[in-house]
Image: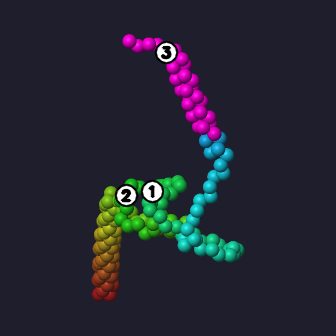
């Protein structure tokens, strides 16, 4: 049969409380110690550093690394008409002026409209040339009629002179 021992229970509780209090004190000491530490300076291998004197002037930095270079802001250039990019002449990051052609684009609809307009102009030029020829032909016909009338007049005048003298 089990015999209750109240003093044993009390000793167990005191021991557990002492262990818990000790753990809390150790944890608090570690936390306080870590918060008082200064941040450690990063270390760099001497082989990867180029010690040099400070000079005044332009500082050029070339950086290589994995990944892609992303722009901070993307600026879209609006076109006046829809089109298809045929050829890219300058890539992002290139130095361009205000009148520099960046890409060559084509639009089949606009090209067809331009061809149709060109054909209409050629057709109008041909119609103009045809009308000009018709007018020149009529002018020559009128000149021939005038010359014929003048010749007939001269013939009748000479005939009248000949009848008067006879």
Colouring: rainbow
In the rendered image, the vertical position of residue 26 relative to residue 106, given as above or below: above
Q: Residues within 10 Å of mark 1 (few under 14, many from 20)?
A: few
Q: Secondary structure at mark 2?
A: loop
Disc 2 residue crowd, few under 14, some 14–19, many 20+, Cα 10 Å: some
Q: Is residue 124 above or below residue 30?
A: below
Magenta stretch in the rendered image: 1-29
Disc on res. 5: 3
Residue closest to the eye, 21 or 12:
12
* Residue 51: quadrant of the picture: bottom right
Q: Residue at x 63, y 39 (%)?
A: 29
Pick the front one: 120 or 88: 88
Q: Is residue 123 visible?
A: yes
- Majority SS type along the magenta span: helix
Look at the picture and state if 30 lies above or below 20: below
Q: Does residue 102 belong to the magenta stretch?
A: no
Question: Tag 3 or tag 1, which sits nearer the N-term?
Answer: 3
Q: Which residue is mark 1?
A: 79
Instruction: Give how far across and how far down residue 79 sits, in percent.
Output: 45, 56
Q: CB of mark 1 within 8 Å of CB of mark 2? A: yes
Find disc 2 in the rendering and name its residue: 83
Task: Assess whether residue 18 is covered by the magenta stretch.
Answer: yes
Residue at the image position 54 percent from the left and 22 percent from the top: 11
């Amino acid at each position: 049969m089990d015999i209750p021992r109240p003093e044993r229970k009390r000793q167990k509780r005191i021991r557990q409380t002492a262990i818990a209090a000790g753990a809390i004190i150790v944890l608090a000491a570690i936390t306080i110690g870590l918060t008082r530490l200064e941040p450690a300076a990063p270390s760099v291998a001497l082989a990867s550093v180029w010690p040099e004197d400070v000079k005044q002037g332009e500082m050029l930095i070339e950086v290589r690394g994995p990944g892609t270079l992303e722009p901070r802001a993307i600026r879209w250039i609006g076109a006046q008409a829809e089109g298809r990019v045929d050829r890219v002449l300058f890539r992002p990051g290139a130095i361009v002026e205000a009148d520099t052609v960046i890409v060559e684009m084509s639009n089949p609809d606009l090209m067809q409209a331009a061809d149709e307009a060109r054909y209409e102009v050629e057709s109008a030029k041909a119609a103009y040339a045809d009308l000009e020829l018709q007018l020149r032909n009529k002018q020559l016909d009128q000149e021939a009629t005038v010359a014929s009338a003048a010749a007939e007049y001269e013939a009748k005048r000479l005939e009248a002179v000949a009848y008067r003298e006879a």
